[in-house]
């Protein structure tokens, strides 16, 4: 395991976290987070009803499910950000994304994107209030390797990019 002390990143602890952070790379996470809503809105225009049911790979989530998942993650992580700011050593509860996903096939992709857009705007407004000590607040996260609010924001941006790549694959099929 190696650590990048400046970013609070512990590489090699969890392969999923490593992949998400590698996807983000050196990009500014706030720029990524600001751009995602418009990219999702573009898929609403680009995709037909049939496209929302397509998956980027066999056995993987459909475009509809990905959009709903992004809205749910924005909701869940938004709560976690707020708790991390006020609760010293905050240890978030985990949520089972596959259990949440059971209802995604019945949800409207337009509503998912609208929900995501509103929640993202609210979370970005919160981030804009952060001072240095807010970014550095320690978190005992269920995913190994995430230990500060800054790291949570970086994870969220990489998570966006990961799912945008999946939607791009669906669009190109």
Image: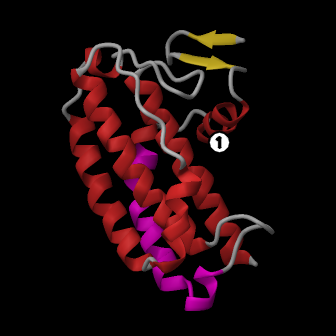
Q: Which residue is mark 1?
A: 23
Location of residue 173 in the rendering, given as x and y in whole percent from the top left corner: 76, 78
Q: Is residue 162 above or below residue 113?
A: above
Q: Is residue 2 left or right of residue 117?
A: right
Vertical placement of residue 173 versus 114, above or below: below
Give the residue at the far right of this rendering: 58
Which secondary structure lies at badge 1?
Answer: helix
**At 65% across and 42% down in the image, what residue appears?**
23
Instruction: State which quarter of the image contains the N terminus.
Output: top right
- Write the residue at 62% across / 11% down: 3
- The picture places residue 111, in percent across and down from the top left corner, at 35, 75
Residue 91 location, x and y as percent?
Answer: 40, 22
| 44 over 125 or under it: above or below | below
| Quadrant of residue 36 within the rendered picture | bottom left
Magenta span includes 134? no
Q: Which region is colored magenta?
A: 31-53
Instruction: Name the residue: 62% across, 89% down.
Output: 50
């Amino acid at each position: 395991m190696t650590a990048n002390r400046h970013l609070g990143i512990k590489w090699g602890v969890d392969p999923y976290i490593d992949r998400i952070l590698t996807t983000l790379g050196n990009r500014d996470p706030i720029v990524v987070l600001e751009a995602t809503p418009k990219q999702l809105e573009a898929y609403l225009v680009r995709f037909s009803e049939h496209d929302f049911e397509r998956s980027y790979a066999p056995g993987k989530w459909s475009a509809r499910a990905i959009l709903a998942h992004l809205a749910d993650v924005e909701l869940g992580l938004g709560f976690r950000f707020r708790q991390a700011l006020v609760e010293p050593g905050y240890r978030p509860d985990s949520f089972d994304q596959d259990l949440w996903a059971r209802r995604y096939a019945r949800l409207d992709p337009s509503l998912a994107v609208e929900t995501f857009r509103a929640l993202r705007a609210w979370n970005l407004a919160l981030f804009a209030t952060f001072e240095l000590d807010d970014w550095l607040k320690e978190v005992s996260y269920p995913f190994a390797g995430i230990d500060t609010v800054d790291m949570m924001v970086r994870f969220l941006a990489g998570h966006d990019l990961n799912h945008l790549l999946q939607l791009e694959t669906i669009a190109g099929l």
